[in-house]
Amino acid sequence: MRHWFRSYLLLLRWSAIRLRYLLPLVLIIQIFLSVGIVIGFAFLLPQVDPATARYLSTGAPTLGLITIGMVMAPQLVATAKTEGTFAYNQTLPVPRTAVLGADVTVWLVVGAPGLILGLLVAALRFDFTLRVGWAAAPAMLLVALTATTIGFAIAYAATPPVTNLVTQLIVFIALMFSPINFPADRLPGWLQAIHRVLPFEYMADAVRDTLTSPPHGIAARPFLVLAAWCAAGLAVTLRVMTRRD
Amino acid sequence: MLHIDNLTKVYRRGVRANDGITLEAAAGEVLGLLGHNGAGKTTLLGQVVGLVRPTGGRITLLGRDPVAEPAWARSVCSFQPQAQAPLTGVTTRQAIEIVGRIRGGGHRAVRRRTAELLTALDIEEWADRPGERLSGGVRRLTAFCMAIVEPGGLVMLDEPTNDVDPVRRRLLWEQVRSLAADGRAVVLVTHNIAEAERAIDRVVVLAGGRVAASGTPATLAAGREMSLELTLPADPPLPAWALRTGRKGDRLTVTVAGEDAHRAVAWAQSLTARFSLNPVSLEDVYLALSDDPEVDRDAALVP
């Protein structure tokens, strides 16, 4: 256990040094994304009622987490695979779970400032008071963790060019065709059915419920589904990381 | 230290990368692994360090089985892979120090050892420059330092001198020798045979996934041909024992069998005072082995 923790901390330090120049860039992208959704999407709608404001202002941080975990993280892993970082790390005397743990931690930390800024922008724009429940932090952690582990699973299982294509696809699906910024009942039945399996809707639900504390309480189902996706992502990633030719 | 017995690796697509390889590396010894691209050298190292699973055969490292315990194998074996180490955004010094710590070194000891290595390889100038702004040679030397900053009992280096300039290659060979002097076993893959000859204690030549020859550079060359070099402007009539000739300017090279050495000297003396008779180099042996289609069955050389 001590060896694991020592390896984890050292790998974390290595990743932090390597990725520090990326942090400002990630922050800028997240701010643009949040501002784009909160302000830009509002242009599409003639009138923003409180329900729409609720969707947009909680959808923005959800999309921020999805972008970090399922787009930027896998793209960086794809680059790392191309550069040989992945292969090199495999030769180091560290537990593979420590490598994964350090990588996931980096992306959770990278996503945090943008998330908070996004919420601030939303609150200012809509003059909207969030009723943040105690479960908000764990919920966002779970969403970020799930997005990142799925992102890693894609990047580790697929070749770098395929990863880049799939992550582009995820952006479009999440932004345009997922009930994140709008209620699910606006989608055609077949698309609703697909979203009952995909994690996007549950991510949005978990974030929205815990940030606005609705009267009907917080549903458990999104958390369970996300935990399952998270476990699947971890399993695939670890399988690829520990595979021997 | 390291025993490999009848090791075979067949990849899923049917490529037989290692075909019954048997070799060993002892503590305090530098073992050179030579062979063409695709001879199976990198696959061999990958199996020792737990990255590739053998199809058959047995590996024993310090009395244990690295195939069953890959995590343990990585902790006692320091490996410099052939691919460049990931250095983007990290300086030479940071990369060496962090890997030293990851390999279990104490903070101060690693810092001191890093500084020593940077000096020994004469790369202090670039110590605090991030990886993306380093030349290929300095990157390779950094990767070399990362492998040996906190070395395990077995050190495996896959083409450590690629892109490195001649002066620093020499410094690198000195470090390889001092690893062996410290009682570690070093397995070295290289194409830089002429230089490595000085650093290597024993050689294993791989061809087509098999051991084509093994022994010390001297035993490999023994009983083989010798090279007679004469400074002669015109070609003399050649004696029957001359195997091959070649000419560069006024220098004539005649290859002779080992047992004809005394005749060759007498013949050369009758022609000119400017001649030399040399045993062939490891590189010549290697090239001769590689040219020979029967190389796989050259059993006389395999002990």
Image (spheres, grey):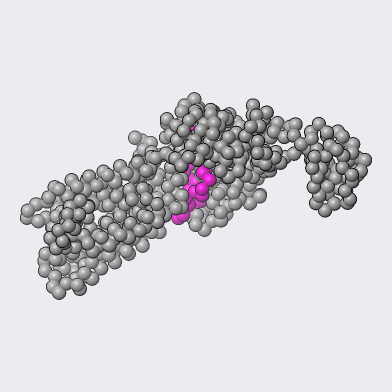
Residue B178: x %, y % from top left: 61, 37
Q: Can residue B135 be spotted in the picture?
A: yes
Residue B113, image x and y in percent? 53, 42
Q: Residue at x 81, y 49 (%)?
A: B247
A18 within the magenta span: no
Between A12 and B57, the residue placed more toward the observer is B57
Q: Position of residue B299 (x, y in %)?
A: 65, 29
> Residue B289, image x and y in percent?
67, 38
- Taking A220 as reference, is A65 left or right? right
Numbered-mark total: 0
Look at 81% across and 42% down and name the residue there.
B254
Q: Residue at x 34, y 45 (%)?
A: A237
Q: Quadrant of residue A58?
A: bottom left
Residue B197 at least partly seen:
no
In the image, residue B87 sits, relative to residue A9, either above or below, namely below
- Magenta range is B74-101
* A23 is higher (above) or lower (below) than B291: below
A79 to the left or right of B20: left
Q: Quadrant of the N terminus of chain A?
A: top left
- The residue sitting at the right extreme is B270
Q: Quadrant of residue B188?
A: top right
Q: Residue at (46%, 33%) from the top-left corner?
A: B55
Residue B156, above or below A37: above
Is the C terminus of chain A in the top left, top right, bottom left or bottom right quadrant?
A: top left
